[in-house]
Amino acid sequence: MNNKNILVTGASGFIGSHLCVALIEAGYNPIGVDNLSNSKAGVLEKIEQITKKKITFIQADLATPQALKECFAAQPITAVIHLAAFKAVGESTEQPLRYHSNNVIGLLNLLNSMNEFGCNKFVYSSSATVYGIPQRLPLDEEHPLASTNPYGTTKIIGESILRDVATYSDDYSCISLRYFNPAGAHSSGLLGEDIVEKPANLFPVMCRAHLTPEYQMTVFGDDYDTKDGTCIRDIIHINDLIDGHILALEKCLGENTGYQAVNLGCGKGWSVLEIIENFEKELGESINYKIGARRPGDTISSYASTDYAKKYLGWQTKHDLPSICRDTIKYMRASGAR
C-alpha cells in the first residue's frame, strides 16, 4: 500500500486523538477532521508532543457536503475511520432530532463523498447500545438489534446503511466496531477524556466529583435486579479499543471483508458501585456521590462476548479495571488537578 492516508473523523475527541497517535506509530498518515463542537484544537498539540509529528487537520462539519468533498479532493484517501457522532444516551432522549440529524445525515454525507472519490474501505464507530435490552449475556454479534434510546437507534440505522452499501458492492470493506464503555487514558498522561466541561461518562464524572468539592455525582438507580442494585457495565481500556481499530483497518485494507460487525469490550461486567470502589482504591480517597433515580434509556446489564473479535481480528484486551482507574487518575493529575 503506497498511500497510507487515513481520514479520521472526530479526530480531536477522546477516541480520535488516541487513534491518531496509534496510526502514526503504526506508519499511517492520519488526516484529522473535526468540527470541534465537543473537543479542543489543543489536543492536536498533544498528539504532536507524543508522536513528534504534526498531523494534517481540517476543521469541517459532516453536515456540510462541500467541506467533505474538499477533504477528499485535497489528497488521496485510502480508508476512513468514522468516529464523529453525538453519543450521550441521556441527551439523546432529550434531543432526538439533533441526534438523528448529526449521526445519520453526517454518515450519509461522508459515504457519498467516499463514493464520489472511489474510497471503499471503512471502519465505523458503533456501540453496544444497538443490542437494546439484552435477551442473553454475554452479548454476541448475533444478538438481535434493538434500541432503548435515540442514540442507539442512530447506530442501528448507520449499521443498516453500511450493510446495504457493502452487500450491493463487489469490493467494499466495512467493519462496524461495537464499543462497550471505553475509559482510561494514554500512558503519557497527555491524552484522556474531558473531565471539565459537562462530562457525561462515568470515569470523567468520577474525576469531577474528586476535583470539585461542591459537585456530587449521581448513581442512576440502586434498585435494579443486580448484585448491588446498580447497573452492570463492561469497561474497556482506550488503548485496547484503539488496538481493535488498527486491526480492523488492516483487515479492511488486506481483503474484501464485505460488512462485518465486531464487539470491542472487556468481556466482563462490573456494577457502577464496584467501578466507583475500584476508582477510590486507586485514588486513595473517597469521592462524593449520591443515589438518584433511574435514567431513561439505560439498560440493566450489558457486557460483551469477545470470541468473534479474537477469531476474526486476532484481538484481545490487555488491561484490567484497576489499570483503567490508574491511567484515568494519572491523566487527571497531569491535567493540573490535585
Image: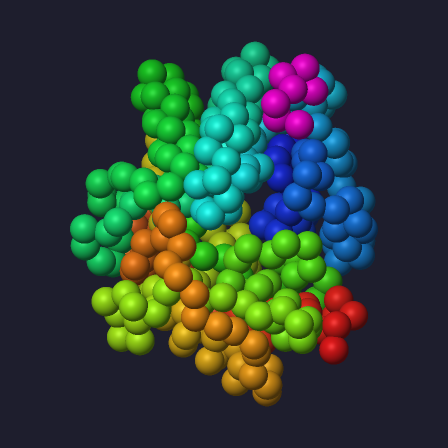
Residue 320 drawn at (x, y percent): 45, 72
User: Can residue 254 be seen at all in this image of the molecule?
Assistant: no
The image quarter containing residue 295 is: bottom left
* Relative to 333, 296 lies left or right: left
Q: Is residue 164 magenta?
A: no
Residue 77 drawn at (x, y percent): 63, 26
Which corner quadrant holds the C terminus?
Answer: bottom right
Relative to 42, is 116 above or below?
A: above
User: Can residue 173 be seen at all in this image of the molecule?
Assistant: yes
Quick one: 316 or 180, which is closer to the camera? 180
Q: Is residue 62 magenta?
A: yes
Specify the segment rendered in magenta: 61-67
The image quarter containing residue 6 is: top right
Which corner quadrant holds the N terminus?
Answer: top right
* Relative to 91, 13 lies left or right: right
> Which colour assignment does the render follow?
rainbow
Q: Residue at x 46, y 48 (%)?
A: 90
Q: Residue at x 59, y 82 (%)?
A: 283
Q: Residue at x 55, y 55 (%)?
A: 200
